[in-house]
Amino acid sequence: METEKTRYDFVDGIRGAAIVNMAVFHFLYDVFIVYGKNPLWYGLPAIHIWQQMICQTFIFISGFVWQWGMEGNLWRGLRFNLYGFLISFITFTVIPSEAIWFGILNFMGCAVLLMLPLRKAVKKVSPAWGLGICFVLFILCKRIQYGYIGIGNGMQVPEIFYSIKILTPFGFPFPGFRSSDYFPVIPWMFLYLCGYFFNEIFKEHDTWKAAARYKVPVLSAIGSRTIWIYLLHQPVSMLVCRLIFKIML
């Protein structure tokens, strides 16, 4: 999270809080779902809200900081996709029932790369209008993976889109598709763009920039290393669970 001379530690702090929450969430998921201690846990409304807050924070912040890493975005996008494919391979090999296909890292990688050709177009859009339109589109397309767009009952998406397997990463999963962590381009790209447009607004407010330099104890340091924590926390969580339940048996 750096400009040429300034590091906005508070942004790291927000991301640090999100990764801590994610680590706790995944540990509880392993206990209650993978080890079957409470199969109903994941379906609780409060748990769904918690999960969505974590993921939406990551995606929004990733879009927010995109233009601060312009020179390295090509490599960053490729690297995220590589990590995502690695996680897919490991989960499919070790725990097939919990395999991850096009999870949040693959989405992040694709979003970073998609912004490269989109940047010139989005630069022409007023940040306030861009933020508002993308937020509305995110809300309207939130259920597209279930076959609907809109609010309430919504409007049904033609089934033909879901019969073409190659469209699965774009939000149209084919029948029988299952992933324990699925973040398609639609609707999540719209939230990513919300972060991008918010950064354009943020840059015009010196007070906001001054506040964003505040360093959150511990969390700012954690937030500057989120990719490594993300990659390592789940194997550590599974190891801890295995040791705990082995001792309890």
Image (tube, helix red, strand yellow):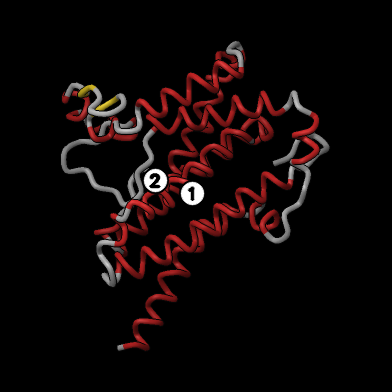
**Amino acid under label 1?**
Ile
Q: Nearer the viewer, mark 1 or mark 2?
A: 1
Q: Residue 87: percent from the left, percent from the top?
A: 41, 54
Q: Which mark is residue 139?
A: none
Relative side of 90 to 15, left or right: left
Q: Earlier in the sequence, mark 1 or mark 2?
A: 1
Quarter assignment of residue 27? bottom left
> Which residue has dot 2 on it?
103
Q: Name the residue located 61 percent from the left edge and 13 percent from the top edge.
A: 126
Residue 43: x percent and y percent? 28, 55
Q: Position of residue 209 (x, y in %)?
A: 77, 35
Q: Residues within 10 Å of mark 1 (few under 14, many from 20)?
A: some
Q: Residue at the location (33% across, 51% down)?
A: 45
x 43%, y 74%: residue: 239
Could you tell me which secondary element the residue under label 1 belongs to?
helix
Residue toward you, 100 or 191: 191
Name the residue: 54% across, 28% down.
194
Residue toward you, 54 or 3: 54
- Towards the viewer: 137 or 105: 137
Residue 23 image offset from top left, x and y in percent: 49, 61
- Marks 1/2: CA distance? 14 Å
Q: Amino acid at mark 2?
A: Gly
Going by the image, does 211 lie left or right of 193? right
- In the picture, which quadrant includes the C terminus? bottom left
Determine whether the residue tagged by mark 2 lies in a helix, strand or loop.
loop
| Residue located beneath label 1 in the image | 54
Residue 31 in the image: above or below residue 158? below
Contact (Cβ within 8 Å) of mark 1 with mark 2: no
- 201 displayed left or right of 54: right
Asked where in the image residue 38 lies, by quadrant, the reply is bottom left
